[in-house]
Amino acid sequence: MRSTATAMSMSQNAMKAVRCHRFAALDKNGKPVPSPSAILDVLHLEEIQPPTLRTDVDKNKVLISTHFAGIQYPDFLQAQGLYQIKPKLPYTPGMDVAGVVIDKGSDVPDDQIRIGDREYANTALCPDGGGGTGALAEVVAVSSSAVFPIPSGLHLSSVANIGRNYCAAYHSLKVIGDVGPDDLVLVDGASG
């Protein structure tokens, strides 16, 4: 666990986060607008209080110091208000984060996650909801079940987008398509 001095200095200092206070393609009543706003008009870099872990509630959560965050098409749709999950406004966008664990709840075992570990987190996998938000911040609080170790040979930047790329491809090929070793697959429109 962090020292008390570190925790106190973090709670007194704000962190930077991208925030969305309104959806670009919806009006105040949630109806589509004829001409959506530019995404840059609804996303703003702000200073907010960093998340902290409450000992009574967040026993299975982890705090990650963000080094890299992935930005993908679902984040764009969400900021427009067109994604299947609409977070409560205002919110911090971002589904994928790669960084270093700076704190963890009391129920997160050391053999699973340790402070100082390099981890990838997919906020869309958090069982407590959120719809895949929060990664575009300097510190992210996530469920330990949504956190995965990053092998030492990989740079943190190389895994920041894995959730929207690898997971979507894997789901399409294995879960929906049930593709096996001898199956022929046509990949159309792939980009990188």
Image (cartoon, rainbow, N blue to C red):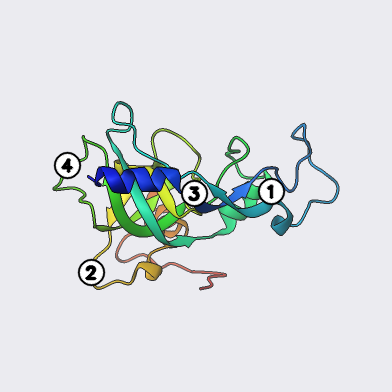
Kind of element beneath mark 4: loop
Q: Residue at x 84, y 51 (%)?
A: 35
Quadrant of image for the N terminus: top left
- Name the residue type under label 4: Pro
Residue 146 makes an appearance in the image: no
State how far apart marks 4 and 1 are (Cα). Answer: 38 Å
Disc 2 + disc 3, Cβ < 8 Å: no
Q: Is residue 12 above or below residue 59?
A: below
Q: Which residue is mark 4?
A: 109
Q: Within 10 Å of the Cα at label 3, are there few (<14), some (14-19), or many (20+) other Cα atoms?
A: some
**Image mark count:** 4
Residue 120 makes an appearance in the image: yes
Tell me the mark number nearer the camera, choosing from 2 and 3: 3
State how far apart marks 1 and 3 are (Cα). Answer: 27 Å
Q: Which residue is mark 3?
A: 14
Disc 4 + disc 1, Cβ < 8 Å: no
Kind of element beneath mark 1: helix
Residue in the foreground of this view, choosing between 150 and 6:
6
State how far apart marks 2 and 1 are (Cα). Answer: 37 Å
In screen coordinates, is 7 left or right of 32? left
- Name the residue type under label 1: Gln
Kind of element beneath mark 3: loop
Mark 2 and mark 3 lie on one chain; the one further toward the N terminus is 3
Residue sitting farthest toward the top: 56
Disc 2 + disc 1, Cβ < 8 Å: no
Q: Which residue is mark 2?
A: 152
Q: Which residue is mark 1?
A: 80
State how far apart marks 3 and 4 are (Cα). Answer: 29 Å
